[in-house]
Amino acid sequence: MPVSPNDLNQLRQQIDEIDSQLVELLAKRAKVTAQVGKYKSQVGLPIYVPEREAELIAKRRAQAEQQNVSPVLVEDLLRRIMRESYHTQNVDYLCTNPNIKKIVVIGGAGALGRIFVDMFERSGFSVQLLEKDDWPNADSILSDAGLVLVAVPIKLTESIISKLTNLPLDCILVDITSTKQKPLAAMMAAHKGPVLGLHPMFGPDVPSLVKQVVVVCHGRHPEQYEWLLQQIRIWGGILQQTSAKEHDDAMVFIQVMRHFCSFVFGSHLAGENPDLQQLISLSSPIYRLELAMVGRLFAQDPVLYADIIFDNKDSLAVLTEFSVKFNQALALIESNNKGEFIKQFFKIGSWFGDYSKQCLVNSRKLLLKADDDRSLSEDV
Amino acid sequence: MPVSPNDLNQLRQQIDEIDSQLVELLAKRAKVTAQVGKYKSQVGLPIYVPEREAELIAKRRAQAEQQNVSPVLVEDLLRRIMRESYHTQNVDYLCTNPNIKKIVVIGGAGALGRIFVDMFERSGFSVQLLEKDDWPNADSILSDAGLVLVAVPIKLTESIISKLTNLPLDCILVDITSTKQKPLAAMMAAHKGPVLGLHPMFGPDVPSLVKQVVVVCHGRHPEQYEWLLQQIRIWGGILQQTSAKEHDDAMVFIQVMRHFCSFVFGSHLAGENPDLQQLISLSSPIYRLELAMVGRLFAQDPVLYADIIFDNKDSLAVLTEFSVKFNQALALIESNNKGEFIKQFFKIGSWFGDYSKQCLVNSRKLLLKADDDRSLSEDV
């Protein structure tokens, strides 16, 4: 049947009506998940249950296929809806250790410290901050602490820890610095009781801890802080255990190299001074994302990144080796040796193994999601 | 009111019921948008209308706020739903120039060429391929072509174009190579009729041309190929006009530098040989994304990337300058000059201007979307 401009308006009204019902369904769903959240916080069940999530998605994908709807679409929508409910359904959490009288967060007014203060308070703990000006009263603040969490900038961590020699013997001493060997050694030296090194692998802007990784480096008497790990699980966090050395070695690759390369990339662009707006408008989604990964660095705190790069003792060696590799590859261009470039490309590819294919698939999915947000008009 | 384990099951059943209604709504919506698509293809309206999209979203955001649903959630869901309908609603497109007897796509069996063949056919054009083995019959294939599209690998483009000296004078000659100066000059030399250089800023894996950028470099007689640009608009493409030189200059920054740096990064990782699985599991979302941007390169065709990097005459100079910048920054670490690092950081930040803040906001949004897809279990 042919349609007319008049019909187009009617069709659009039908779409609006359907979308309106969609919003109503979401409101209804949020009310039910709020009740689920309440129940879970009462009994201490984790918000994020991978099996329930997988089962829920599988059922709807099956229904979608029957009704000629894209199962991928349905899965994407459900995952987005569940994110919302993970991040909003829990106002309070079950307290895994009501015997802890007080938690002291040193640097709890800082960006990342504040998240832990908030999570502890929402789990029923009594939390006290210890900030720069509070050190004259530190002894009385710390005297009845069941847990002390050190959440100060990386360059202050060791000197702050070295002051913590008078904690109660059963007090748990924890840090959340982004390096682990030195802070852990400093904690072991300062305190004879239970010691734990954590590295939350997320920034201060996460809406909740659900699906966020927290690296765990055991120090001393793990049985005495098992309740804390359980508490983080209830918040939705994913614990990854490693040794402090393995952690720090990995961080040189993960943090130092990427930040440093992004810095150099930005420095190079600013030096060559191309028209940034034109670069952006001429970029495909993948390049826009690459450029955004560089650009985002410079909207952040330079001191933090200087500390991460300069304070890692392996930075210089690893980055020097990177520079060697860079110049070797450059020599291939100079001698127009495409054959060797391709040979090395395959070799690197086999080092990455299946992961590279997985990256390609995942990044394609992600780029489509990035495109969803674009609102474009043309320029011809 | 307190809830019990039994109630939890009931609540989950309610959620399943709501999700089932959601799938039904999507099925209903798809039927309506299919009719919209049919109408649009009849009258040649573009599928993607930014104003209609903005209006539709604004209405539902307003409703969401009234009903205590997150407007951001509603917008994300609607954008994802609209993506689906953009990519599926149009089976056929209005033909903007029914007078064109035949379109020949040279290299139309290749990955990107195939997309254009498909789009032309779905717009009612008669399309013929000209592949490697067809050159003995090239004269007869090309003799009645109204448009010839060159879609061969970059290293063959110029030599193929140089063979196209016998096209009908009113035939439009177009290429889609990722560099523009040389192919455009070659086309102008080979053919006296209308000439157009295009660079589709997307890979062969896009589900449709909606919201995809196509760079336009005018050659000769633009009035004779205006219908082609209009056709691309109807497919949903976004046209960006630039000169061939500006385009190529930008591509050194956009393509050459990023690919080369990713190559070196991969080469460095493979050389240092850290435990890749551990790197991934210890990574925060942003680092996983950074790593994925490197890893994805090596799942692709090395010859393509060798061509892009080696065949750009400015590669060596720009990458050498990058190497200089890298070593300058390295010297800052060697001399432990944090102050200068921070000073340069601010300077680069001001070069990026507001764009860096925008990148940070957008990448945060995108990382949340990346997290939606994660299905994690812990490791402690």
Image: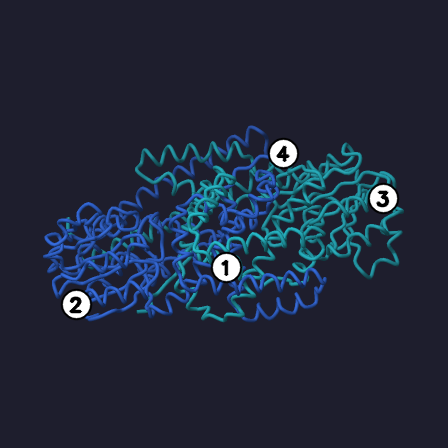
Chain colours: A cyan, B blue
* Chain under disc 2: B
Q: In the picture, residue A194 is in which quadrant?
A: top right
Both labels 3 and 1 in a single chain: yes
- Asked if labels 2 and 1 touch by Cβ distance under 8 angstroms, the answer is no
Marks 4 and 2 sit apart, C-alpha to C-alpha, by 66 Å
Residue found 55% across the figure and 46% down from its top: B288
* Foreground label between 3 and 4: 3
The residue where tag 1 is placed is A292
Q: In this figure, which residue is indicated by the disc labeled 3? A: A189
Q: Are marks 1 and 2 on the same chain?
A: no
Q: Badge 1: few (under 14), some or many (20 or more) residues near its Cα, within 10 Å?
A: many
Q: Disc 1 marks which amino acid? A: Ala
Frontmost of labels 4 and 2 is: 2
Residue A156 in the image: x percent, y percent?
A: 77, 56
Instruction: Tell me the quarter of the picture where residue A145 sits.
Output: top right
Q: Are dots 3 and 2 on a single chain? A: no
